[in-house]
Image (cartoon, coloured by chain):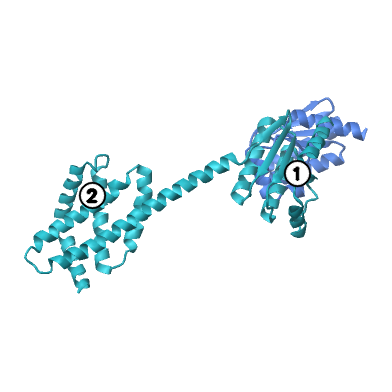
Amino acid sequence: MDIPILKIENFLVVTIQTEMSDDEILKLQKDILSRIKEVRASGLVIDITALDVVDSFMGRTLSNIANTANLLGAKTVVVGIRPAVALTLVELGIRIKWNLNTALNLEKGIDMLKKCIEIRG
Amino acid sequence: MSMNLNKELSLLFEGHANQLKEQWISEMKKLGFLEQVSDDEIEKQFTNLCDIVVSTLKTGKYDDAEKYARDIAQKAVLQHMTVDQVIGGMLKLQDVYQCFIFEKFKDDKRLCDLVSACATVINKIVSINALAFVEESEQEILQQQKEAMLALSIPVLQIRDEMLIVPLIGIIDSARSQQIVEELLNKIAEYQASIIIIDLTGVPIIDSLVANHIIKTVQAAKMLGAETIITGISPPNAQTLVNIGVDISTLITKNNLRTGLKLADEMLQK
Protein backbone atom coordinates (compact mmCIF):
# COMPACT_ATOMS: atom_id res chain seq x y z
CA MET A 1 0.00 0.00 0.00
CA ASP A 2 1.32 3.43 -0.91
CA ILE A 3 1.59 5.90 1.88
CA PRO A 4 0.05 9.26 0.93
CA ILE A 5 2.40 12.22 0.83
CA LEU A 6 0.34 15.35 1.38
CA LYS A 7 1.29 18.89 0.49
CA ILE A 8 0.34 21.79 2.75
CA GLU A 9 1.58 25.20 1.66
CA ASN A 10 5.25 24.64 1.08
CA PHE A 11 5.53 21.53 3.20
CA LEU A 12 5.06 17.84 2.70
CA VAL A 13 3.32 15.80 5.39
CA VAL A 14 3.71 12.03 5.63
CA THR A 15 1.71 10.11 8.21
CA ILE A 16 2.81 6.54 8.79
CA GLN A 17 -0.25 4.63 9.99
CA THR A 18 0.88 1.02 10.12
CA GLU A 19 3.93 -1.05 10.85
CA MET A 20 6.09 -1.22 7.75
CA SER A 21 8.43 -3.80 6.35
CA ASP A 22 11.96 -2.81 5.41
CA ASP A 23 11.09 -2.81 1.71
CA GLU A 24 8.10 -0.56 2.25
CA ILE A 25 10.21 1.87 4.21
CA LEU A 26 12.77 2.06 1.42
CA LYS A 27 10.03 2.60 -1.12
CA LEU A 28 8.59 5.39 1.03
CA GLN A 29 12.03 6.98 1.15
CA LYS A 30 12.22 7.01 -2.62
CA ASP A 31 8.68 8.37 -2.99
CA ILE A 32 9.28 11.17 -0.51
CA LEU A 33 12.52 12.28 -2.11
CA SER A 34 11.12 12.36 -5.65
CA ARG A 35 8.05 14.22 -4.36
CA ILE A 36 10.22 16.84 -2.67
CA LYS A 37 11.99 17.46 -5.94
CA GLU A 38 8.71 17.53 -7.84
CA VAL A 39 6.97 20.16 -5.69
CA ARG A 40 10.12 21.92 -4.50
CA ALA A 41 9.04 21.58 -0.90
CA SER A 42 10.91 23.56 1.70
CA GLY A 43 9.88 21.38 4.63
CA LEU A 44 8.95 17.78 5.45
CA VAL A 45 7.02 16.47 8.43
CA ILE A 46 6.97 12.75 9.17
CA ASP A 47 4.29 11.80 11.67
CA ILE A 48 4.82 8.49 13.49
CA THR A 49 2.17 8.89 16.20
CA ALA A 50 0.60 5.58 15.22
CA LEU A 51 3.77 3.54 15.56
CA ASP A 52 4.22 1.43 18.69
CA VAL A 53 7.53 0.05 17.58
CA VAL A 54 10.40 1.71 15.79
CA ASP A 55 13.33 -0.59 15.13
CA SER A 56 16.88 0.42 14.34
CA PHE A 57 16.40 0.06 10.59
CA MET A 58 13.34 2.28 10.62
CA GLY A 59 15.23 4.78 12.74
CA ARG A 60 18.23 4.84 10.48
CA THR A 61 16.07 5.23 7.40
CA LEU A 62 14.16 8.11 8.96
CA SER A 63 17.46 9.77 9.67
CA ASN A 64 18.61 9.11 6.10
CA ILE A 65 15.42 10.62 4.72
CA ALA A 66 15.94 13.68 6.91
CA ASN A 67 19.53 14.16 5.81
CA THR A 68 18.82 13.65 2.13
CA ALA A 69 15.79 15.94 2.27
CA ASN A 70 17.99 18.55 3.88
CA LEU A 71 20.36 18.31 0.95
CA LEU A 72 17.41 18.78 -1.38
CA GLY A 73 16.49 21.91 0.56
CA ALA A 74 13.64 20.57 2.66
CA LYS A 75 14.05 20.74 6.42
CA THR A 76 12.70 17.62 8.14
CA VAL A 77 10.91 17.18 11.47
CA VAL A 78 9.77 13.84 12.91
CA VAL A 79 6.70 14.28 15.11
CA GLY A 80 4.67 12.16 17.49
CA ILE A 81 7.27 9.79 18.82
CA ARG A 82 5.67 7.90 21.69
CA PRO A 83 7.24 7.87 25.17
CA ALA A 84 7.91 4.14 25.04
CA VAL A 85 9.44 4.41 21.60
CA ALA A 86 11.66 7.30 22.65
CA LEU A 87 12.79 5.36 25.69
CA THR A 88 13.67 2.28 23.68
CA LEU A 89 15.57 4.29 21.11
CA VAL A 90 17.51 6.10 23.81
CA GLU A 91 18.27 2.79 25.54
CA LEU A 92 19.60 1.53 22.23
CA GLY A 93 21.83 4.59 22.12
CA ILE A 94 20.48 5.64 18.78
CA ARG A 95 19.59 9.25 19.44
CA ILE A 96 23.13 10.59 19.18
CA LYS A 97 23.82 8.98 15.84
CA TRP A 98 20.56 10.10 14.30
CA ASN A 99 20.62 13.82 14.72
CA LEU A 100 16.90 14.20 13.99
CA ASN A 101 14.68 17.19 14.60
CA THR A 102 11.68 16.16 16.63
CA ALA A 103 8.46 17.78 17.79
CA LEU A 104 5.57 16.71 19.98
CA ASN A 105 2.84 16.86 17.37
CA LEU A 106 2.07 17.86 13.82
CA GLU A 107 1.15 21.42 14.74
CA LYS A 108 4.37 22.04 16.60
CA GLY A 109 6.34 20.36 13.85
CA ILE A 110 4.96 22.75 11.26
CA ASP A 111 5.58 25.71 13.60
CA MET A 112 9.15 24.58 13.93
CA LEU A 113 9.59 24.35 10.17
CA LYS A 114 8.12 27.82 9.69
CA LYS A 115 10.51 29.30 12.23
CA CYS A 116 13.48 27.60 10.64
CA ILE A 117 12.56 28.82 7.20
CA GLU A 118 12.00 32.36 8.53
CA ILE A 119 15.49 32.37 9.95
CA ARG A 120 16.98 30.94 6.82
CA GLY A 121 15.14 33.58 4.82
CA MET B 1 20.25 -43.74 71.74
CA SER B 2 18.19 -40.73 70.75
CA MET B 3 19.02 -41.41 67.10
CA ASN B 4 17.49 -44.82 67.50
CA LEU B 5 14.42 -43.39 69.14
CA ASN B 6 13.98 -40.91 66.30
CA LYS B 7 14.37 -43.66 63.77
CA GLU B 8 11.81 -45.79 65.52
CA LEU B 9 9.37 -42.88 65.68
CA SER B 10 9.79 -42.11 61.99
CA LEU B 11 9.06 -45.70 61.02
CA LEU B 12 6.08 -45.76 63.32
CA PHE B 13 4.59 -42.56 61.91
CA GLU B 14 5.16 -43.69 58.37
CA GLY B 15 3.54 -47.03 59.03
CA HIS B 16 0.40 -45.51 60.53
CA ALA B 17 0.15 -42.49 58.29
CA ASN B 18 -3.46 -43.11 57.27
CA GLN B 19 -4.78 -43.65 60.75
CA LEU B 20 -2.95 -40.56 61.97
CA LYS B 21 -4.26 -38.52 59.10
CA GLU B 22 -7.90 -39.39 59.82
CA GLN B 23 -7.40 -38.44 63.42
CA TRP B 24 -5.69 -35.16 62.57
CA ILE B 25 -8.34 -34.12 60.09
CA SER B 26 -11.20 -34.88 62.44
CA GLU B 27 -9.49 -32.96 65.24
CA MET B 28 -8.84 -30.03 62.92
CA LYS B 29 -12.45 -30.01 61.75
CA LYS B 30 -13.61 -30.00 65.35
CA LEU B 31 -11.57 -26.86 65.89
CA GLY B 32 -13.13 -25.31 62.75
CA PHE B 33 -9.73 -24.67 61.25
CA LEU B 34 -10.40 -26.22 57.87
CA GLU B 35 -13.63 -24.54 56.87
CA GLN B 36 -12.35 -22.71 53.82
CA VAL B 37 -9.85 -25.33 52.73
CA SER B 38 -10.66 -28.03 50.17
CA ASP B 39 -10.29 -31.73 50.94
CA ASP B 40 -7.50 -32.17 48.41
CA GLU B 41 -5.61 -29.32 49.97
CA ILE B 42 -6.04 -30.79 53.45
CA GLU B 43 -4.75 -34.14 52.29
CA LYS B 44 -1.76 -32.48 50.63
CA GLN B 45 -0.97 -30.36 53.65
CA PHE B 46 -1.05 -33.33 55.96
CA THR B 47 1.12 -35.46 53.68
CA ASN B 48 3.58 -32.62 53.38
CA LEU B 49 3.73 -32.06 57.10
CA CYS B 50 4.06 -35.74 57.79
CA ASP B 51 6.87 -36.12 55.29
CA ILE B 52 8.71 -33.27 56.88
CA VAL B 53 8.37 -34.63 60.41
CA VAL B 54 9.45 -38.08 59.27
CA SER B 55 12.41 -36.84 57.23
CA THR B 56 13.53 -34.60 60.04
CA LEU B 57 13.33 -37.49 62.47
CA LYS B 58 15.37 -39.60 60.10
CA THR B 59 18.08 -37.15 59.16
CA GLY B 60 18.09 -34.80 62.13
CA LYS B 61 18.26 -31.87 59.69
CA TYR B 62 15.69 -29.11 59.32
CA ASP B 63 16.26 -28.19 55.65
CA ASP B 64 12.90 -29.55 54.51
CA ALA B 65 11.14 -27.80 57.35
CA GLU B 66 12.69 -24.48 56.42
CA LYS B 67 11.77 -24.82 52.78
CA TYR B 68 8.23 -25.79 53.70
CA ALA B 69 8.01 -22.88 56.09
CA ARG B 70 8.95 -20.42 53.36
CA ASP B 71 6.43 -21.91 50.95
CA ILE B 72 3.59 -21.98 53.38
CA ALA B 73 4.31 -18.50 54.64
CA GLN B 74 4.03 -17.09 51.13
CA LYS B 75 1.03 -19.16 50.30
CA ALA B 76 -0.71 -18.29 53.52
CA VAL B 77 -0.20 -14.64 52.79
CA LEU B 78 -1.74 -15.17 49.38
CA GLN B 79 -4.70 -17.24 50.50
CA HIS B 80 -5.33 -15.23 53.64
CA MET B 81 -4.87 -18.29 55.79
CA THR B 82 -4.08 -17.03 59.25
CA VAL B 83 -1.03 -17.79 61.30
CA ASP B 84 -3.06 -19.66 63.90
CA GLN B 85 -4.51 -21.92 61.20
CA VAL B 86 -1.07 -23.07 60.15
CA ILE B 87 0.63 -23.15 63.53
CA GLY B 88 -2.51 -24.57 65.12
CA GLY B 89 -2.47 -27.37 62.57
CA MET B 90 1.07 -28.23 63.46
CA LEU B 91 0.43 -28.21 67.18
CA LYS B 92 -2.60 -30.42 66.63
CA LEU B 93 -0.41 -32.81 64.68
CA GLN B 94 1.90 -32.94 67.65
CA ASP B 95 -1.06 -33.77 69.89
CA VAL B 96 -2.10 -36.56 67.57
CA TYR B 97 1.40 -38.01 67.45
CA GLN B 98 1.80 -37.86 71.20
CA CYS B 99 -1.54 -39.50 71.90
CA PHE B 100 -0.50 -42.20 69.49
CA ILE B 101 2.81 -42.70 71.28
CA PHE B 102 1.12 -42.86 74.67
CA GLU B 103 -1.23 -45.52 73.44
CA LYS B 104 1.45 -47.60 71.76
CA PHE B 105 4.03 -47.47 74.53
CA LYS B 106 1.75 -47.36 77.59
CA ASP B 107 3.78 -49.95 79.47
CA ASP B 108 7.13 -49.27 77.87
CA LYS B 109 9.79 -47.64 80.00
CA ARG B 110 11.00 -45.60 77.03
CA LEU B 111 7.70 -43.72 76.88
CA CYS B 112 9.13 -40.51 78.34
CA ASP B 113 12.11 -40.45 75.98
CA LEU B 114 9.94 -41.09 72.94
CA VAL B 115 7.51 -38.32 73.81
CA SER B 116 10.29 -35.85 74.42
CA ALA B 117 12.10 -36.81 71.19
CA CYS B 118 8.90 -36.23 69.22
CA ALA B 119 8.20 -32.94 71.00
CA THR B 120 11.70 -31.62 70.36
CA VAL B 121 11.46 -32.13 66.63
CA ILE B 122 7.94 -30.80 66.19
CA ASN B 123 8.54 -27.79 68.43
CA LYS B 124 11.53 -26.87 66.38
CA ILE B 125 9.51 -27.17 63.15
CA VAL B 126 6.75 -24.99 64.60
CA SER B 127 9.23 -22.34 65.63
CA ILE B 128 10.81 -22.34 62.18
CA ASN B 129 7.39 -21.77 60.68
CA ALA B 130 6.46 -19.02 63.08
CA LEU B 131 9.68 -17.24 62.22
CA ALA B 132 8.98 -17.58 58.51
CA PHE B 133 5.58 -15.97 59.03
CA VAL B 134 7.05 -13.02 60.85
CA GLU B 135 9.71 -12.51 58.19
CA GLU B 136 7.20 -12.79 55.40
CA SER B 137 4.86 -10.22 56.86
CA GLU B 138 7.73 -7.86 57.55
CA GLN B 139 8.83 -8.18 53.94
CA GLU B 140 5.34 -7.52 52.74
CA ILE B 141 5.09 -4.34 54.77
CA LEU B 142 8.51 -3.22 53.56
CA GLN B 143 7.49 -3.84 49.97
CA GLN B 144 4.28 -1.85 50.40
CA GLN B 145 6.15 1.05 51.93
CA LYS B 146 8.67 0.98 49.13
CA GLU B 147 5.93 1.10 46.51
CA ALA B 148 4.15 3.90 48.32
CA MET B 149 7.37 5.87 48.46
CA LEU B 150 8.04 5.33 44.77
CA ALA B 151 4.55 6.47 43.87
CA LEU B 152 4.90 9.63 45.93
CA SER B 153 8.41 10.37 44.92
CA ILE B 154 8.01 11.74 41.41
CA PRO B 155 5.87 14.86 41.34
CA VAL B 156 5.53 16.17 37.80
CA LEU B 157 3.91 19.58 37.99
CA GLN B 158 2.46 21.62 35.17
CA ILE B 159 3.39 25.23 35.74
CA ARG B 160 2.56 26.84 32.37
CA ASP B 161 0.60 25.61 29.39
CA GLU B 162 3.58 23.86 27.92
CA MET B 163 5.96 23.70 30.82
CA LEU B 164 6.51 20.98 33.41
CA ILE B 165 8.57 21.11 36.57
CA VAL B 166 10.01 17.98 38.19
CA PRO B 167 11.46 18.74 41.61
CA LEU B 168 13.41 15.63 42.58
CA ILE B 169 14.02 15.06 46.26
CA GLY B 170 16.03 12.37 48.00
CA ILE B 171 18.41 9.70 46.88
CA ILE B 172 17.83 8.37 43.38
CA ASP B 173 18.55 4.70 42.78
CA SER B 174 18.22 2.87 39.51
CA ALA B 175 14.64 1.68 40.09
CA ARG B 176 13.55 5.19 40.90
CA SER B 177 15.40 6.77 38.02
CA GLN B 178 13.78 4.32 35.62
CA GLN B 179 10.41 5.36 36.98
CA ILE B 180 11.28 9.03 36.68
CA VAL B 181 12.04 8.59 32.99
CA GLU B 182 8.81 6.77 32.29
CA GLU B 183 6.63 9.07 34.37
CA LEU B 184 8.13 12.17 32.86
CA LEU B 185 7.84 10.99 29.26
CA ASN B 186 4.22 10.01 29.75
CA LYS B 187 3.44 13.38 31.30
CA ILE B 188 5.15 15.17 28.41
CA ALA B 189 2.92 13.33 25.97
CA GLU B 190 -0.15 13.89 28.15
CA TYR B 191 0.31 17.64 28.64
CA GLN B 192 2.01 18.21 25.26
CA ALA B 193 4.71 20.08 27.09
CA SER B 194 7.59 21.61 25.20
CA ILE B 195 9.82 22.60 28.11
CA ILE B 196 10.76 20.55 31.16
CA ILE B 197 12.65 21.79 34.18
CA ILE B 198 14.27 19.09 36.31
CA ASP B 199 15.26 20.55 39.66
CA LEU B 200 17.96 18.61 41.49
CA THR B 201 18.26 20.87 44.56
CA GLY B 202 16.92 18.11 46.79
CA VAL B 203 19.16 15.36 45.45
CA PRO B 204 22.07 14.88 47.86
CA ILE B 205 24.21 12.57 45.77
CA ILE B 206 24.55 12.19 42.03
CA ASP B 207 26.66 9.28 40.81
CA SER B 208 27.44 8.19 37.28
CA LEU B 209 24.34 5.99 37.17
CA VAL B 210 22.00 8.85 38.07
CA ALA B 211 23.81 11.19 35.71
CA ASN B 212 23.46 8.67 32.94
CA HIS B 213 19.77 8.37 33.59
CA ILE B 214 19.30 12.12 33.58
CA ILE B 215 21.04 12.33 30.23
CA LYS B 216 18.87 9.54 28.89
CA THR B 217 15.77 11.33 30.13
CA VAL B 218 16.84 14.53 28.42
CA GLN B 219 17.48 12.69 25.17
CA ALA B 220 14.18 10.84 25.27
CA ALA B 221 12.34 14.09 26.04
CA LYS B 222 14.13 15.72 23.15
CA MET B 223 12.93 12.92 20.91
CA LEU B 224 9.37 13.64 21.90
CA GLY B 225 10.05 17.27 21.06
CA ALA B 226 10.59 18.79 24.49
CA GLU B 227 13.63 20.71 25.71
CA THR B 228 14.93 20.02 29.20
CA ILE B 229 16.57 22.43 31.61
CA ILE B 230 18.43 21.04 34.61
CA THR B 231 18.61 23.27 37.68
CA GLY B 232 20.04 23.19 41.16
CA ILE B 233 23.03 20.89 40.81
CA SER B 234 25.00 21.46 44.01
CA PRO B 235 28.73 22.34 43.84
CA PRO B 236 29.90 18.96 45.19
CA ASN B 237 27.66 17.18 42.71
CA ALA B 238 28.93 19.31 39.87
CA GLN B 239 32.44 18.40 40.90
CA THR B 240 31.61 14.70 40.97
CA LEU B 241 30.04 14.88 37.54
CA VAL B 242 33.09 16.57 36.07
CA ASN B 243 35.44 14.17 37.84
CA ILE B 244 33.71 11.06 36.57
CA GLY B 245 33.74 12.53 33.10
CA VAL B 246 30.03 12.66 32.35
CA ASP B 247 29.45 14.45 29.08
CA ILE B 248 27.11 17.28 29.99
CA SER B 249 27.57 19.26 26.81
CA THR B 250 24.11 18.19 25.68
CA LEU B 251 22.45 19.49 28.83
CA ILE B 252 21.09 22.96 29.44
CA THR B 253 21.87 23.77 33.07
CA LYS B 254 21.02 26.69 35.35
CA ASN B 255 22.13 27.28 38.89
CA ASN B 256 18.71 27.51 40.49
CA LEU B 257 15.04 27.04 39.77
CA ARG B 258 14.43 30.79 39.49
CA THR B 259 16.89 31.32 36.65
CA GLY B 260 15.75 28.06 35.10
CA LEU B 261 12.18 29.33 35.01
CA LYS B 262 13.29 32.62 33.52
CA LEU B 263 15.13 30.83 30.74
CA ALA B 264 12.16 28.53 30.15
CA ASP B 265 9.83 31.51 29.80
CA GLU B 266 12.16 33.07 27.28
CA MET B 267 12.33 29.83 25.33
CA LEU B 268 8.53 29.56 25.33
CA GLN B 269 8.14 33.07 23.94
CA LYS B 270 10.44 32.37 21.04
> What residue sits right under mark 1 in the picture?
B230
Circle nearer the N terminus (1, 2): 2
Three-letter amino acid code at the position of disc 2: Glu
Label 2 marks a residue whose chain is B
Q: Is residue B66 visible?
A: yes
Q: Nearer the viewer, residue B167 or B216?
A: B167
Determine the residue positioned at 71% across, 38% down: B224
x and y percentages locating residue B136 in the rendered image = 41, 51
| Horizontal and vertical percent position of residue B62 | 32, 64
Which subunit holds the residue at mark 1? B
Q: Is residue B35 left or right of residue B198?
A: left
SS type, badge 2: helix
Q: Which chain is rendered cyan in the image?
A: B
Q: Colour of chain A?
A: blue
Under mark 1, the amino acid is: Ile
| The quadrant where residue B229 appears | top right
The residue under label 2 is B43
In percent of width and height, residue A25 lies at: 70, 40
